[in-house]
Amino acid sequence: MSKNFIKSKTNEFLSNKYNKDALQAIIQHFKESKDKQLPTTAYILSLELICIDLLKTSIMNIAVVPLEPRELTADDNHKIWIRDRYEEAFELILDCVESEKPSEAQEALNTCFKILMNEGLNPLDDQLNEQPFPILKLNKIISKLLLSEHSMKNMIIRLSDYSIYEDFCFYLWKLIMKNLIPANKNDLTSNFIQNFIELLNILIPTQPTVNTREAQVDDDDDRKFMCKNMKLEINVLRKNVNKVWNVIVQWPHTDATQRQLLVLLLEKVLIYLDKPTMLTDYLMDSLDVGGQISLLALQGIFILIHKYNMAYPNIYEKLYMMFEPEIFHMKFKPRLFHLADIFLTSSYLPETLVAAFIKRLARLSLIAPPQDIIIILYFIGNLIIRHPGLKRLICDQNSDGTQEIAEDPFIMDEADPNKANALKSSLWEIQMLRNHVLPNVAQVAKNIVTQPLPNQEWDLSNFLELKEDDLFDQEISKKVREYAITFNRPMELKNQQQTAISRYWKF
């Protein structure tokens, strides 16, 4: 159906609210287009305009006097019919939230929230003593997002536009606690868990608001409300976060949802937990999974050690075994180097332990991408600065810059760093990197081996986000000295054979 037809029918109904045929035609053609998977954005915008106008004009409101029954008039029946079409239109728009077309789905979600906000500001029931919040419509919207058969991450992220409203957050938490968490774990699907965790990521503030009377007075003017002055207090938020966390941590998680949950824990949930030390078993179990999950669990353990003085057995052994070739292809690689740098900061750690880390990193540098080699070299340099006794690992060399290397006593496959024989080995790997094809890498390796180490450590954070493009840009930006050429430039290939081609072409 053409846009002109939709626009015409919309104007017909808005100019005459008793024109049932115009509204019915829009809804009917909307259904047909949706069933045939045709574009529906024009219908969504049309019904948005109609629904908001109906709410603002209060044409659907029926005056009811308590304890005084009366017969419905023709006007009342018309209002009931319009209200039924209003609810039907909302359901049709809500169904489009699952559209395969992102622009159409986003338009449908925006329209649903515009209708929700206007219904809150213009209640359908005049008899309510206070301004209500359309919690039933909010429940329908959130349920549609959570119960979808596919990931709704991109749509749920759009809810961040509304999370600034305190009444929205208040009633959404209320729905989560009462309606949205399935009572039976067997009803959970991977998509539901992913969508639910993404919803929590939007809903939980990164930093809790200071809950003091002075702060509340200062912040009252800054608070925003969608349609009702309902404040979400920090103590209520903290209580909700603790309850929800205790539930979702027991759900059956895939590797994807486990990573998602750990990121949520580290970035949002941890600061709200009443008893963070209860995370010990969960984090230790996650640490044994491997890959990115182990890395995220390691960060959680570090926070508990640093802030709550927790002690974990074999934590250095687990950190040691995380340095595998796979780390160079991990999304959270910079996080691993950052955490390892913090864990190995103390100058009181045994040299045997630190030497094992240095040797393992040096061995990995032989197969690492160039940008990661630079990170490793500076990390090794920092560890040697912290432990000057480990300078003996830097192998001696002959006058020509080479060294005869016997069998390396270092055991790369040994899980216990104290048994890896690192102190009996040497950093011959860095010697080899002096001949790396990239001048940037070769120069850093040369500085580590041949130059005195500085008294102050290198700031590793300056190199953690280093990319291949950065190395390329650094190389081409160097000014290279131009040398005079003492021979004539050749204009053709030497000793060309006289062929038919050579009579017409020169190479």
Image: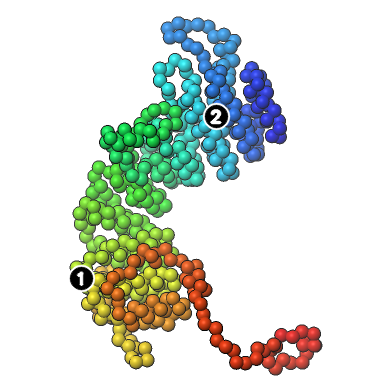
Q: Secondary structure at mark 2?
A: helix
- Decide if residue 83 is on the left or right side of residue 408: right
Q: Position of residue 483 (x, y in %)?
A: 55, 86
Amino acid of disc 1:
Pro
Q: Position of residue 442 (x, y in %)?
A: 42, 79
Task: Give me the residue at 59% from left, 89% from top.
Answer: 485
- Decide if residue 130 is on the left or right side of residue 239: right
Q: Secondary structure at mark 1?
A: loop
Measured along the vertical axis of the image, is residue 146 above or below residue 29? below
Task: Tell me the quadrant of the picture where the N terminus can be found.
Answer: top right
Measured along the vertical axis of the image, is residue 24 above or below residue 210? above
* Mark 2 / mark 1, whichever is N-terminal: 2
Q: Position of residue 376 (x, y in %)?
A: 36, 71
Q: Is residue 413 visible?
A: no
Q: Position of residue 151 (x, y in %)?
A: 49, 45
- Where, by quadrant of the figure, is residue 316 drawn? bottom left
Q: Is residue 444 visible?
A: yes
Task: Tell me the quadrant of the picture where the C terminus can be found.
Answer: bottom right
Name the disc covering residue 90, or none.
Answer: 2
Task: Give me the residue at 40% from left, 72% from top.
Answer: 373
Q: Are the residues at dot 2 and dot 1 in contact (C-beta closer than 8 Å)?
A: no
On the image, numbered disc 1 is attached to which residue? 350
Measured along the vertical axis of the image, is residue 334 above or below residue 68? below
Query: Total of numbered circles in the picture?
Result: 2
Marks 2/1: CA–CA distance = 67 Å
Amino acid of disc 2:
Phe
Rate crowding at label 1 as few (under 14), some (14 to 19) or many (20 or more) other CA atoms within 10 Å.
Answer: few
